[in-house]
Amino acid sequence: MDIAKMGFDPIFLNALHDLLDFTDEPGQCSHHAPSRAYVRDAKAMAATPADVVEYPNSYQFTIDMPGLKSDQIKVKIEDSQLVVSGERKRESEKVKEGKLVRKERRLGKYLKKFGLPEATDTDKVSAAYQDGVLSIMVEKKPPPEPKAAKNIEVHVG
């Protein structure tokens, strides 16, 4: 049956199909639809709060990651970016003698990416995790020493 004869606009249906297509398989995605992994990462980035403070000799990144153990957190530098990730999974323990009335604590993926300036020394990075807060210090490279003035001899000729 022809959809146009049913009163549906084919352009509208194609747009709707593109919005609802979240295929993860490469080559299977139609048009410009985002993959599920992209949508999941975008949600994780928006839901992971962070502060960045610049000091004269370093940058400090502070990221809230409650409920994680230190071995569940990954900190890495790739392509001039500081990438922080972790995941809090559903706890397997069940309520024994009662019923769960409310469940509001955040589960899922934590993700934050920070572009690092050229002045950072990626070999001097430290991270500490305490009370659900991850603190990362990235040292800055010392400023280059100014070059000494060079005298140029002027020839007459």
Image (spheres, rainbow, N blue to C red):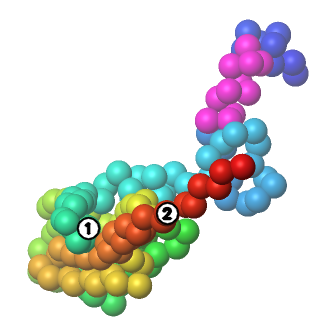
Q: Quadrant of residue 95?
A: bottom left
Determine the main secondary structure of the stretch shown in magenta: helix
Q: Secondary structure at mark 2?
A: loop
Q: Amino acid at mark 1?
A: Tyr
When asked about the image quadrant of residue 65, the answer is bottom left
What span is colored magenta in the figure? 9-19
Mark 1 vs mark 2: in front? 2
* Residue at image location 65% in from the left, 55% down from the top: 155
- Given residues 39 and 92, the one toward you in this image is 39
Few, some or many residues within 10 Å of mark 2 (<14, 14–19, 20+): few
Q: Quadrant of residue 7?
A: top right
Q: In the image, residue 35 lies at what x, y percent?
A: 62, 52
Q: Residue 67: horizontal and vertical position, in percent?
A: 22, 76
Question: Which amino acid, by three-letter code, is at mark 2?
Answer: Asn
Q: Is residue 30 part of the magenta span, yes or no?
A: no
- Give the residue at mark 2: 151
Q: How many marks?
A: 2
Q: What residue lies at 22% left-to-right and 61% top-to-bottom? A: 54
Q: Is residue 154 visible?
A: yes
Answer with mark 1 or mark 2, whichever residue precedes in sequence.
1
Q: Position of residue 49 (x, y in %)?
A: 25, 58
Question: Is 101 situated left or right of 33 in this image?
Answer: left
Element marked by disc 1: strand
